[in-house]
Image (spheres, helix red, strand yellow):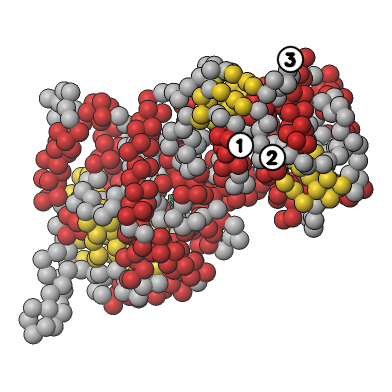
Amino acid sequence: MEVENFIREVLVKSLNEYMMPFPTDKKVCTEWAQDVPRGGGTVIYTGCMYQVTPVSDLFNRALPILSKVKGAEKLYPLSSILKPTNMQKERANRVLRSIASMLKRNGVQFNYLYEDEPYSGTVLLELGYVDEFAQYAKRVKGHLEKHQVRRLITVDPHSYYAFSRYKEFVPFDVEVVNYLELVKDLGTRVKGEYVIHDSCLYSRFLGIRENYRSLLNNAGVKLREDPFVTGPLTSMCCGAPIGPVRRDESQKIASYRAYQLNQLGDKLIVVCPLCYLALSPYFKGEVVDLAELAYNELGTGQRDTS
Amino acid sequence: MSWIYAVERAVRNNVPKVEGILKDHPYLLDLAAKVRDGKTEVLRNLDRYVEETIKAVERSGGRAYLASTSEDAREIVSKIVGSGKTVVLGKSMVAYEAGIRKHLISTGNDVWETDLGEFLIQLADEPPSHIIAPSLHMTKERAEEVMRSVDPELKGASHERIAGVARKFLREKFVKADVGITGANAVAADTGSVVLVENEGNIRMTTILPEVHVAVTGVEKILPNLELAMYEALVQAAFGGLYPPSYVNVSSGPSSTADIEMKRVRPAHGPKEFHLVLLDNGRKEAAKDPVLWQSLLCVRCGRCHLHCPVYRVLGVNWGIPPFTGPMGAMWSAVIYGDRRPAMMCTHSGGCKEVCPMRIDIPRVLEELKARELKR
Ligand code: SF4
């Protein structure tokens, strides 16, 4: 229980102080947004997930050690010095800019809260800190009200799921959707065959697994499916959700999942930053987020990976 | 890695089979819904149904007992069996939970598991890794190695040959057995009948050949009536991937005959005595729990296991045997008060999708995590 108690202490403290799971330089969260209007109403919601997930494994590694050190929680604010590398930052920016431009191309208007964007609290729910999640949800609700947010367009499965549970704990009338429900066209042609790893939350809890499949099919992607590996009832988790408390087991699951997916091919599409983080070290080949496929710096409208 | 390969083979064999069965026999989904309703009714009024069941067993000439703990169950069974007997066991996870086999051996009996998987587990002295396929962790090669303690000649044997060695060895035990101990897939409260579904034929022999039949099962296996109890057996078989089952057995008291003047008398050719031991061991308390009660709906089909990433990687190392996999993470809390297995749930959600009883397993495990963290 040491790790669990330590995690609770540092998480709750950080959420209280910064509305983030660990102290974070907000610039890291917001630098992707170049020309998105600031404000409430309909907002794109990143939860800073794509931006800081790359450093979360450092925490997973440090937590069991720190939990044994007396007074280590006091060092927690220092974690703001942990920043993603430039490459990791560029990748997150690429994904988020791509999502924003897909939304715009599909006629969706939105604002962004920039540094006022609060974290959803999803990690609390996943690890089982349900009371703490309920408390935090109340705070986020107040915060969103203050900023007159009416509609959240989420871009990752974990934030989407967390917000979809808010109503159980607090009256919550903000509409919550996901970009994959709004975007009908990837805006580019993608050649080549890919394997897809489903997000468990998108696939089995939020029911949008077909949304991204049809987006990809329409863009010309050929998906290599296997009913035992990528089926709606059989697709396995990447293991990431238990990373903070059971890192070894989490990695074992990730490595087996990557092995399964590799049997189907060497180019993998993911739809979640945690899946990307968990599977990348084990998957032999290229791993891309769906939004990266749509991103086209050169604007040629073609991405040929065949 | 050998576990991962063993379970991978099981998934490829079992998953399409269950899907095919449900497609070919769509009425099974209706039966599953009826069983869920029946079990829900019993769990809401558990004390009343336990009482009704005990009376019904007595009406049919048997004896029924309510055991509060595993220790009580061992004591009751021990008194019935005595010592110096040959005992055959038909697969009962509740008997495993209560430690009955090892206890009866320690009190001087010759005790044999007769289900092939359980027999392998007994020979290897290992814990069961799956609720209906206890030796799931053993590849054929390992099963052969284990079976060599019965037939040292075995080498490069086929599945059939390995099964044949067990058959030969156990036939002799069946004939000699004084007592047969089984579990129960369902118990009918209105008739006191025990319903058992199987494929090997070992349970039929265990319930019929010895002079005494003892069924040891959990109180949550009670259904309001024999109709629903029969449905339960069919649902369990179908969702376990073995449908139609080779055998469904109904035991209502000791054997009987009405061949003289149509007057039903007992015993006839089968057992002279019938005993039903209903085990509580935390179940009654769980039935009152606003979240955990759902776990008692489980019919132990073992389907959730094969759709769970944690089980597929960790196997028997997740949960407290016989309670492994997603159902085991719930049941480890019900029986042993241990909520730690729940902490390992990745919230993948496959279990919930495939559970015939529509148990919201991820939500139960989330609640168990929350309680563990509050400790
Ligand atoms: S929890 Fe559901 S799927 Fe799992 S063994 Fe029980 S009835 Fe079957």
Q: Disc 3 to disc 2, how far (Cα)?
A: 27 Å
Is any atom of residue B199 visible in this view?
yes
Q: What residue type is labelled 2?
A: Val
Residue reaching furthest to the left = B260
Looking at the image, residue A304 sits to the left or right of residue B102; the answer is right
Looking at the image, residue B178 sits to the left or right of residue B335; the answer is left
Precedes in sequence: disc 3 or disc 2 = 3
Q: Are marks 1 and 3 on the same chain?
A: yes
Q: Position of residue B106 (x, y in %)?
A: 29, 43
Q: Position of residue A274 (x, y in %)?
A: 65, 30
Q: Is mark 1 within 8 Å of ligand 1?
A: no
Placement of the C terminus of chain B among the 4 image quadrants? top right
Total numbered labels placed on residues in the image: 3
Q: Residue A215 carries which label?
A: 1
Residue reaching furthest to the top = A86
Q: Residue at x 55, y 29 (%)?
A: A221
Task: From the image, tell me which residue sits under label 3.
Answer: A87
Are the residues tagged 1 and 2 within 8 Å (C-beta)? yes
From the image, state whether disc 3 or disc 2 is nearer to you.
2
Q: Residues within 10 Å of mark 3 (few under 14, many from 20)?
A: few
Placement of the N terminus of chain B among the 4 image quadrants? top left
Q: Depth check: give the residue in front, B64 or A95.
A: A95
Which of the chains bears the disc numbered 3?
A
Q: Which amino acid does label 3 sit on?
A: Met
Q: Are marks 1 and 2 on the same chain?
A: yes
Precedes in sequence: disc 1 or disc 2 = 2
Task: From the image, tell me which residue sits under label 2.
Answer: A183
